[in-house]
Structures are given as C-alpha cells and as structure tokens.
Image: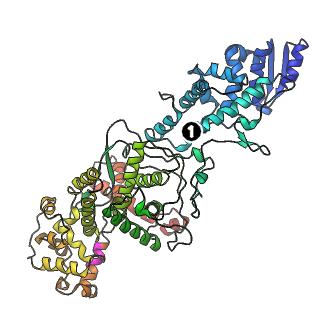
Amino acid sequence: MMIHLADAVRDGFQKILLRTVDTDIVVLAVAATTKLKIQELWVAFGTGQHFRYIPAHEIAAFLGPDKSQALPMFHAYTGCDTVWSFNTRGKKTAWDTWKVFDELTPALVHFSTGTADISDDVVAVLERFTILLYDRTSNLVNIDEARQALFTKKGRAMEAIPPTRGALVQQIKRAVYTGGHCWGNMLKVVMDLPSPGDWGWIDPHNWKPLWSMLPEASTSSRELICYNVIQVCLAEVTEAAAVVDSDQYDIINMACVACHVGIFLDILDRPLRTVIDDLHVSAAPPRQFPDPNVLVRWEWPADFTSSPHIGTYSITTTLALASKEWARAQLEANTFEREDYRELTESIYFYLGGDVSPYEAVQIPLGFRMRRPGAMHSARFMASSIYLLTMQLLSSIWAMKAREQTVVEKMAQIVALLYGPYYLKSRLSTSAPRHDLEFYYSLLAYISVEPAAARKGLDSVRRHMWYLVPEQVILCLFDDMVSDKEKKKVAAALVALPAPRYFAPGKPNFQPVIRLLTDTRPSLAVFVTERSWLLFKLFHLDTAWLLTEPATWPLSPAYQELRDLTRDMKVVNDSAERVVKDVQEYANMTRDAGHIDDVILVRIDHRCRLCHLRKADLNDII
C-alpha cells in the first residue's frame, strides 16, 4: 500500500485517501506524509459504527518531522503484529511516557533508518524508557535493578515488572527489524532485508522469537533428573521471578536474626504459637532483597553433609539429619493438608538431600515441583522461608552478589535446620514444652556455626518461655514423644508438691525458668512447681493415675479425658486473627460491648454453617 502511495505522489497526486482496518497502516501513513511531503493524506479506517476518517497529514504536522519519522519504530517497540507488547503496558501508557521522556525520539529516529548494529548508548535510552514505562518515579538506569526494586519495595506482581535486560535486547532487535529494516524501507519496491536470525528470531524453518540469550534453567542445570520438576516453569524462563516482600523480611541487609516465640492469650496464660515462630529480621537501610529470575529446580548433591550449604560441622550434620528425617516422616504420612505447609516441608526435605523422584519411598502426592510465586504476607514466616529455600536451591542458575549469596545461604540453612521444623510443629499443644526445650538447646549448639544469629535467637527465646513455665510444662505428660522415664520424673515432682488452694492470676515470670536452663539440657521435671497443679484444679479430674506407671496411664478415664482436652487446645493464632478481624470490622457498629459480642458470635456461627457456600449448606439452614 505504501508503494502505491509513493507511486501516486510521483504521478502528482497531493490529496490521497487510503482504506484500511490495520493500525499499522495508520502509523505508516503518518510517517509517509513527512517523507513524501504530501499535502493531504486521509485514512478511511475501521468498519461499521467505528468507521472514521483519520487525517494523517494533520497528525504529522502536530507531531513534527522527528516524531513522525520515529512513530513506526515506537509502534514496533511497544507492540505490533510481529513484536510482542510489554505485559500490562498498553499504547496509551507508552505514549504518555514518551511525552515526558524526549530523549527517546533521537534513539527511535536512529533505529528507524535500519541500522546495521545496535550501540549500547542507544540501547541505554530504550532501557531507561522501559523503566519509566513501569515506574514513572524511578531514578534507575539499569532495568535489572528496576525489576528488583519493583519486586522488593513496591510489591509488584511478576506480571507487572519489566523484562530482564537480556530479554529487552532481543525485544529491541525485533523492533528494529520491523520498524527500521522493514517499515523504514516501506517506500522501496525491493527491500534488501537482513536475516531475521540476526534480529531476535530463531529457527529459519519456522521463525519464532528468541526471548533471551540467557541459558534456560532446564539446560543450565545438567543434573536435572527428578520427575515433574519443571511443571510450573514459565515458558519464558527468564521472565519468571520470586516475589518477596521486604517490608518484614529484609534478608540482604540482615543485622541479626531473632527467634520470636509467641504472644499470649489468657487461658491458663496459654500463648499462641505462630507469629510464634515467625522469623524477624532486623535490617539496616536501604531495604533490598535478592531477585531470582527462574523457579525451576536443580538436583541437590547426594551427600548433603559435604555440601557447602550444610558444611562439615558436627552439630549442623546432626540437626540436618534430624530435620530431614522429620520432614520425610511428615511427607510419608501426608500430615499437612494445607498447600503452603506441605510446600515448606517438601522444600526442607529436598534442600537437605531427600530424594523426591517417583522411585523413592517418599511419594509426594502431586510430585515435587517448584511452585510459581504466590502471595507474600509480611506477617508470616512461611512464605519467606519457602522463597529463601527456593533461591538457595536455584543459586547455581541465577546470579546473586557475593553478599546476597552468603546471606541467603545462611538463612536457608537456619530455616531448614531450625525454624522450619519448629514452626511446622507449633500446632501440637502437648508437645510444646518438649519442642521449646529442644529448640533452645539447638540454638545454643548452633552458636558454634553462626554465633551472631544463634545468640540473637536465644535472646528472643528467653523472653518467651511460655511453655516451660510451671503452669504449662505439665502438658508434656500427654506428649507421646516424651519417654515414660521422663514422664515419671515429671509426675513424681508434681506429686511431691502440695496443690495450692488458690492460684493468683498474673503474667508468668520467665526468670526462674531461665535460671534452670544450664549448659546441659535439663529434665522437664525441674520446671515443675506448686503452680503446675493449675491444670488439674481447673478441670476437677481424678489424679490418682499420677501415682502409677506411665505405661498404664492411657487406661485411666481421667487421663484420657485430660489428654483429649489438652490436645484440643488451640495454641496457634489463626483463629485469633479471624476474631481480631471481626472485632475491627464490627467495632464501630455500637458502643454496647454485649452487642458487639453477639454480632461476633453470629458471624462465627454463620461462617461455620456456610463454610463452603454450597447450595446444600443453604438448604440445611432453610
């Protein structure tokens, strides 16, 4: 069509009408008006009620000669029939960005001539334009740094960040081929075009885009042999990224790791146990986070004890073996129904050298796979733990700075050996005393590996000895993993003390508990005092079974009832968070506290009755 237009101009026509439904022709008409110096060029565009006449000559006059010449290249770069557009960024956003970034025009004019090569200086201009396309307030000039900033500081979804620099260079090449070599020569009858293989495409028999020169994860990790590993890998591997919320978990600038162990709710002064094991990181400004570009998996060395991620420390090996076997047992038993809990368990097991192939005894129901990035909750330890383990597992196939690599490696090890299992066990009320004691002495031993992190963790744990206070330590009597010998010691210590007639309310004092924590792990019996009778006092149950052998306790109805009651205790904060949300939502409805209580109770009852929002549930209510 442009050749016919040029021929008409050569024949002396100065008022011409083109008919098209293709937006590419409209763009080329504006550029051709300037090149051919046409007096009037109209484009009859569209069909039906969307049909209209577009004055290309008026648009060209408004834009000026430079922008008119640059327009086809702009159209190609921001998305046309043969060049992909930027995800979530349309033409209007791109146009508005061009209006505030005048440096783009000379670069586009340069490329519109069909240049034989692409200079770094001109690429830098388009790189800066692309950054502004996604973040108008950014001062960055490196697009990879801009990706990281959008991930970590602004919480962008991976669909709303710019491509990597490697992918951007290929985008520029395809745009130059279309907007420069093809459209730049639109008035020539015969075009001398270079091979598309030099300009962002591959496969001469069936040309398709070359997304990036960076190696694909599936080929860069030569030992990638496990089953079902790449199920969720994106088609454009270099475009995938792990989203990490740095507002709560700023790992790179870590100054210390504190192991926070709980808030309390006044039912037997029973604390809730998951903000509990959330990992709190005290960081120095500015906040940053490593930005992984792929989420596929590489094989872990068979002998994990010789891996640089685990080291040769005897305590590290001991913790790793214990954590690995615990994770294996949970996977075999399919303990966790929630996907995120199961994912963290799988990641720990795999990180520590567990075999997740389909021929291994551990059969993961859906097969082991690296999940796509999901929601990153700043108040939850689990999401950041999964991302840390994933980043460390993939550290061989994406670049991190030396300091980032060191910190991620240390944090992943802490998660796998200490915090992950402890966090996932936190729902077990009767096991809480044993878990807290084990965790304390694991941190104490870990001082030989990471002194700063372990000591900071111990400082925090000492402020949260909730389940080692006398009132709570008695829960260990109902823990199946506590030996009969240990239970007998606890029972003997309790029976030797008189039961108080009155228990003064108040917040537990942790100092006496801390003084009992010597260099060697003590028996749980040392934490028993007269106040340990509180549980029995509240439930008014027979305690004669305390005088018998622990092996016979399950035969006692009183023991069975108390065991069931203690195991049903809610020691995690999920339900509490829902109640807090209800209070915040309905607190302003009335000043009557009783009315608020009634509303919350009705809300809870409604949620229980309509937990699935199915028709059958509605029919039951009606």
Q: Is residue 98 above or below residue 367?
A: above
Residue 474 located left or right of residue 195: left
Q: Position of residue 548 (x, y in %)?
A: 19, 87
Please, is residue 229 above or below residue 566 in the view? above
Asked if the magenta segment contains residue 564, the reply would be yes
Which residue type carries mark 1?
Answer: Thr
Residue 208: image x %, image y %? 73, 43
Q: Is residue 383 visible?
A: yes
Q: Residues within 10 Å of mark 1 (few under 14, many from 20)?
A: many
Q: Which residues are magenta?
A: 562-566
In the picture provided, is 494 more to the left or to the right than 278? Answer: left
Q: From the image, give the main secondary structure of the stretch colored magenta.
A: helix
Q: Quadrant of the N terminus?
A: top right
Residue sitting at 33 percent across and 58 percent down?
274
Q: How many marks?
A: 1
Q: Which residue is mark 1?
A: 164
In this rendering, would 253 be left or right of 263?
right
Quadrant position of residue 458? bottom left
